[in-house]
Amino acid sequence: MARADWEAVIGLEIHVQLATATKLFSAAPVSFGDEPNENIDPVTLGLPGALPVVNARAVELAVRLGLAMGCEIDRASRFARKHYFYPDLPKGYQISQFEEPICRGGVVVCDVDGVEKRFRLTRIHLEEDAGKNVHEGGRSLVDLNRAGTALCEVVGEPELRSPADAVAYMKELHQIVVALGVCDGNMEQGNFRCDANVSVRRRGETRLGTRTEIKNVNSFRFVGRALEYEIDRQIALVESGGAVVQETRGWDDEKGVTRSQRGKEDAQDYRYFPDPDLMELTLDEAFVERVRSELPELPRARRDRFVRDFGLTPYDADVLTQSAARAAYFEAVATATGDGKTAANWVINEVLGALNKAGLDVESSPVSAAALADLLGLLGKGTLSSKMAKDCFLAMYQDGVAPAAWVAKNGGQITDTGAIEAVVREVLDKNPEQVQELLSGKDKVLGFFVGQIMKATRGKANPQQVNEILAREVESRR
Amino acid sequence: MATTKADAGPKPGVVAALVDAQRRGEVTATALVERSIAAARATQTLNAWTHLAADKALARAADIDRRRSRGEKLGPLAGVPVGVKDQIVTRGIPTTAGSRILEGWVPPYDATVIRRLEAADAIVLGKLNQDELAMGSSSESSAVGPVRNPWDPARVPGGSSGGSAAAVAAGVCPVSLGTDTGGSIRQPASFCGLVGLKPTYGRVSRHGAVAFASSLDQIGPLGRTVADVAAVFEVIAGHDPQDATSLTAPVPAMDDLGEAVAGLRVGVPGEYFASGLDPFVRAAVDGAIALLGANGAEVVPVELPHTRYAVATYYLVATAEASSNLSRLDGVRYGHRTVSSVKDIGELYARSRAEGFGPEVKRRILLGTFALSHGYYDAYYKKAQQVRTLIRRDFEQAFERCDVIVGPTSPVTAFGLGERLGDPLQMYLMDIYTIPSSLAGNTSVSVPCGFDPEGMPIGLQIIGPPLGEGRILRVAGQLERLLPADERKPRVYAEGC
């Protein structure tokens, strides 16, 4: 049986680390890369008597994310304790949300292979992160710097049907949380990571197969590869008469395989119950409305607007909305020049092209949006030809030369009809044989004349005018 | 005549007397602390202390004396030695909550109540013995052995704040802090002839109180007079941003404790006088109620129909929360860790906890774990929360008809050491009168109202609506004045403070 006879059912749970200065329930700082156990306090350590107090900023960021994803924001939600013993979990329970999450529903809209797809969310809830166990030299050590860090867990419905769906969904969500300022998006540090639930079934089957959960995948590529592997593994298993075991698996990128970590028989009873240390989390209408009013434009809405208002291709619009900075840069240039398409071409090909070679993005551009708009203005007016504009841009980029100064030094494009006619006639007079060849239908010779004319004007003659005048002058000699 | 007595104002407090004596230069804080330390040592047989912080207390006393000599303005509890239940976290002073699981733990921070006491220039004398992790009604389950009752060392002082009661009753220090989850301040106060206040849930910060049952725990004061308890309450109460369940309501000054009870409606619930109530306790409580009535209070019968479900409800809610709260005591970061070799982390947890917890704590962890388990949650924990709402409603309805509710604090007086250890259920049932107001989250105080024929103290419980501390302390203050003077002293007694 071929893979085409099978369908995968995938649901992602994505952990988004909130960009707060302090932890979800204490004033201990959130910081990456410090010495172990520096960013701790009695609450983080789970000392006896220490009590959690919810971080208002984390709540605001969760609401912002929920509103952006089109979730229902629950005006009253509750924190619950999830119990299990592990050394990186200081209290013996994680404070999370269970029956009453802060956001319900919502949707991720993304393009998969050029087709727009909508994937629904189940919920978004707030919870604290655990610490880290370090095993070295036969000893196990615990670093609690990360413990208590504020997370939003974004739980998707099992509506993804392929690794491509999953990767597109994850990328879209990543772009959104970064655009919202909810998360710094740093995946290497684990600030945006996912657990993938996956099962397979024969096409046409409506019941779900037994699922496995691949834990803690922190790159788009890994998610794609891990799911590919896991789907193949499950299909092969079932086709060979075996059965998928419900379990937790980990992705080993070096070997390119998933591995069983914990079986269902080890499944824990988390004994969730409402955390009596924390009151119901209530949000008033004015707060929710304020957060709503402060929502920035999301990448996808911006992309659609760029296509609609500036006439860009979806591809160009996509490139220009990869970050808020790119979009702002482009929009400043396009608005100043009134020509979105040209602005897009220049920003993508010249500005981003040059920056990309240096591994930089638009934030580090030596050419400001205003300077580029000036340059495109000169191009639009015909003061500069495209070729000259590119030379000018290079000077701007490398030496910080202003477009006006460059024109003053190098001169502008020759657009005076009389002057161009004089040069054309001179060149034609000097080359009577080639004129005859051209008149006899040898169009190739046209290039020779254009080259001669441009050479005589040191490249400054307006190419379009040169073409027109040359055609007219040749005709007149027939 | 009784009314003239009431007009004379409340019984003078020991705390105020000590503060005034220092102000007049008759005694120094250092001398007070020295007296308390000597008294603590003289009454060692009570086993009331888990740790006497003599050096720290003397250093603080010297500092206070120095500041006074420089003419600095001092706080309202300046130089007053205070004992603190070991359940409360004290920076630099070992805190074990009476459990082996916390042996050797020296906290790096202070509970909010300790910060407030010290800001008021009170002096923490040391840590007081108790039932292990506040679980018990007799102070017999401590890892360092039982506390004895100063009135009769063969009997228990009540619990779980037994050390807090014994030390104050024995004259070591004028006031102490206890914690009350289902009666752990009021019942020992009753057994030791003291005033003990359980504030409204949320009135006093729990930050730094080792959690037993988070939705029930409250820190409160014990003292020999109503005025002393009020003085400490004023200092420790009030909003704390470090406790999310802390109430924001302002704390009124407790300066009208002498106000007459005339016109006050005193509710008497029939359910609190049912079978099982010791006849001598009943007689003393009836007498106190009659005294209030004779002095102008209107005595009205009230109903608290869900009282009979209170103990069962409490032992589901409290054990469930305890099983969760005690998870952090795992031997990994602090406290007791097994020294035997273990094969994995699971065995490390199991052994450390098996060695660290005593039998009563283990019993409650198991009960609570069961109540929260998958498939049982709805039938136990959730149902208990629903019954809790009914119990709260009982009180709301009763307080529509009366201003305070009175009854016995405990159905019995102090019993003999070891007498009731064999039957946990009987032990649990002894908290029948204190548990309901804990579940409802309102405030109540136990105040002495007489002795049984064997000379053991009897306590009257006065229950108020949420934030009604001022009201119940006023009634307690009146009763203190109205009752015939009794100068009896406990058998184990030292002239400390």
Image (spheres, coloured by chain):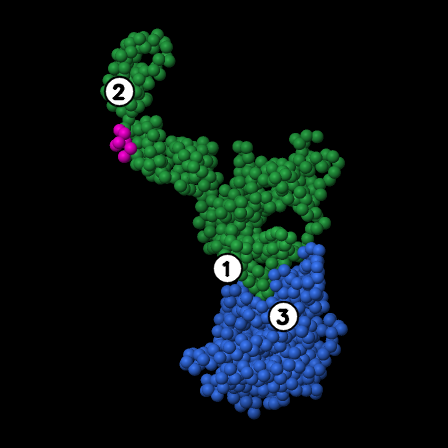
Chain colours: A green, B blue
Label 3 to label 1: alpha-carbon separation? 26 Å
Q: Chain of mark 2?
A: A
Task: Check whether the beta carbons of the residues at disc 3 and disc 1 lie within 8 A of each other.
Answer: no
Q: Looking at the rendering, which quadrant does residue A250 occupy? A: top right
Report the front residue among A48 and B293: A48
The residues colored magenta run: A405-411
Q: Which amino acid lies under the numbered mark 2 shown in the image of this protein?
A: Ile
Marks 1/2: CA distance?
74 Å
Question: Is A452 rendered above or below residue B228?
Answer: above
Given the current orientation, which residue lies at the most extreme front position?
Answer: A137
Which residue type carries mark 3?
Ala
The amino acid type of the residue labelled 1 equals: Ala
In front of the other: B357 or A134: A134
- What residue would you read off at disc 2? A420
Look at the image and say whether residue A410 sits in the magenta stretch.
yes
Where does residue B492 sit, x and y in percent of width and height? 65, 85
Answer yes or no: is residue B322 visible. no
Return the mark for residue B456.
Answer: none
Residue B47 placement, left or right of A75 = right
Instruction: Please say if the residues under marks 3 and 2 sit with CB atoms less than 8 Å apart.
Output: no
Marking on residue B97: 3
Q: Residue at image x 52%, y 79%? A: B58
**Mark 1 residue element:** loop
Mark 3 vs mark 2: same chain? no
Which numbered tag is attached to residue A27? 1
**Sequence-wise, which precedes: disc 1 or disc 2?**
1
- The quarter in which the C terminus of chain A is drawn is top left
Where residue B478 appears, x then y in whole percent? Answer: 56, 84
